[in-house]
Image: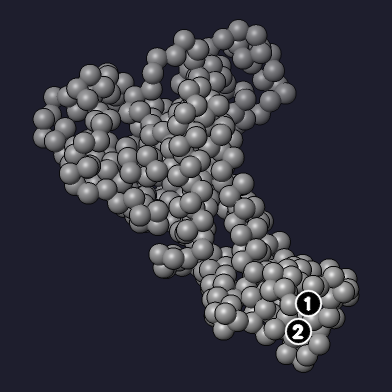
Amino acid sequence: MRILALILGAFCCLGVFLDAFQTIILPRRPKGRFRPTRLFFLVTWSPWVALGDRLKNKRVRDQFFSYFGPLSLLLLLAVWASLLCLGFALVYFALGTPFHDGLQTAGSLLAELGTDIYVSGTTLFTLGLGDVVPLSRVSRFLLVMESGVGLGFVALVIGYLPVLYQAFSRREVSVALLDGRAGSPPTAAELLRRHGYAGGDAGLIQLLDEWERWSAEILESHVSYPILCYYRSQHDNQNWLAALVAMLDSCALLITLVEGEPVRQAQLTFAMARHALIDLGHIFHVDRPDHLAASDPDRLPPEVFYRLCGALGNLPMRLCQDESARKRLNEIRSLYEPHAFALCDYLRLTLPLWVAEQRKIAPLWETIGSTGSGANSPESALGASEHVSELAVSSHLHDQDHGI
């Protein structure tokens, strides 16, 4: 029995060491089906989803799912600490509980195991109470080693949390900036429409370049720390997966319909964004077979397609009149939409529309750029011309031809 305890204890300790190394330190995709972290998320995420799906209110449901990421991080750290404590306790038990404990009942294996767990816990968290004394050199060595492991564990936790939240913050800055460029929630039609002004190609190329880099950062950070995928955006109408798919939709439209400088950058951004989407699906093992992908809902049915044509009507794009362009668009969509649906179903996130729904209130960027009265009227601008530089953006807010 004590030999079995020694094997189980060593297995627990080595398993946690390897799992924590792969999860926190190793900058690669973790391997292994029986890793404690993977088993933890398999056990916890499915019940959490089952409870969340029962909530009828969308806002309450999204709020409920947003708790899982931070809470799972704390629970995962607690699981690692518990397994380490149990592993060392089993090793002490295999050595015959070489401690002097005034509360221990002689001849009771459960009492011995209780003493071992107590000693392991106080040593791992470096309490150093001194009420239990080791009686052998081996036990002294193991106590010192476990206290070192406890200090290292605390240091890893302290260093791990800032890294996660810095990566989360970098991700969300770009998602929030997309609000003014593609709407909230973001759509491909709105993004292209808002860059339809004179000289908008340069701004569009810059935006696509930024999102190529953003996709690469997502690929690097979320593959190394998959727990970030469970973290939700701070705003109800935004999420990182919808932003990623909206950019893929925009790139698909540009590749299909446009000739010129934005196309090459759209191809580069599309390749990197699709790479990130597929690799994240591999991490959660949600690759969807072809027969299941065929049953996914159509994000661009005929009625939505004609709305898209109307939304792009003022832009130099000819979509409805060219059947080959529509066919090419569907082919490009098939390269990423099945992966997006699979990841969306797993994480319980929402995918963006192709065309934004009609709103009664104009977006803020249009309100600021439109002609109005008061501070932004031509009269007020002329009155302030001697105080404001002609090169300042604020002096031209009244100008219809000025784009923001």
Question: For residue 17, what is the image quadrant?
Answer: bottom right
Residue corresponding to mark 1: 106
Across and down, in percent, residue 315 comes to 29, 25
Q: Residue at x 70, y 21 (%)?
A: 386
Whether residue 357 appears in this view of the structure is yes
Camera-nearest label, 1 or 2: 1
The answer for how far apart the CA atoms under marks 1 and 2 are is 13 Å
Amino acid tagged 1: Ala
Judge by depth and name the residue closer to the eye, 206 or 350: 350
In the displayed structure, 78 sits above or below 142; it is above
Q: Residue at x 22, y 49 (%)?
A: 289
Earlier sequence position, callout 1 versus callout 2: 2
Across and down, in percent, residue 248 comes to 34, 42
Seen as rendered, the residue at the extreme front is: 107
Q: Is residue 128 left or right of residue 322?
A: right
Under tag 1, what secondary structure? loop
Question: For residue 151, what is the image quadrant?
Answer: bottom right
Judge by depth and name the residue closer to the eye, 288 or 323: 288
Residue corresponding to mark 2: 98
Do the CB atoms of the residues marked 1 and 2 lie less than 8 Å apart? no
Whether residue 155 appears in this view of the structure is no
Q: Residue at x 55, y 75 (%)?
A: 8
Q: Is residue 16 left or right of residue 301?
A: right
In the displayed structure, 169 sits above or below 89; it is above
Judge by depth and name the residue closer to the eye, 78 or 225: 78
Across and down, in percent, residue 80 comes to 61, 64
In the displayed structure, 145 sits above or below 281; it is below
Under tag 2, what secondary structure? loop
Amino acid tagged 2: Pro
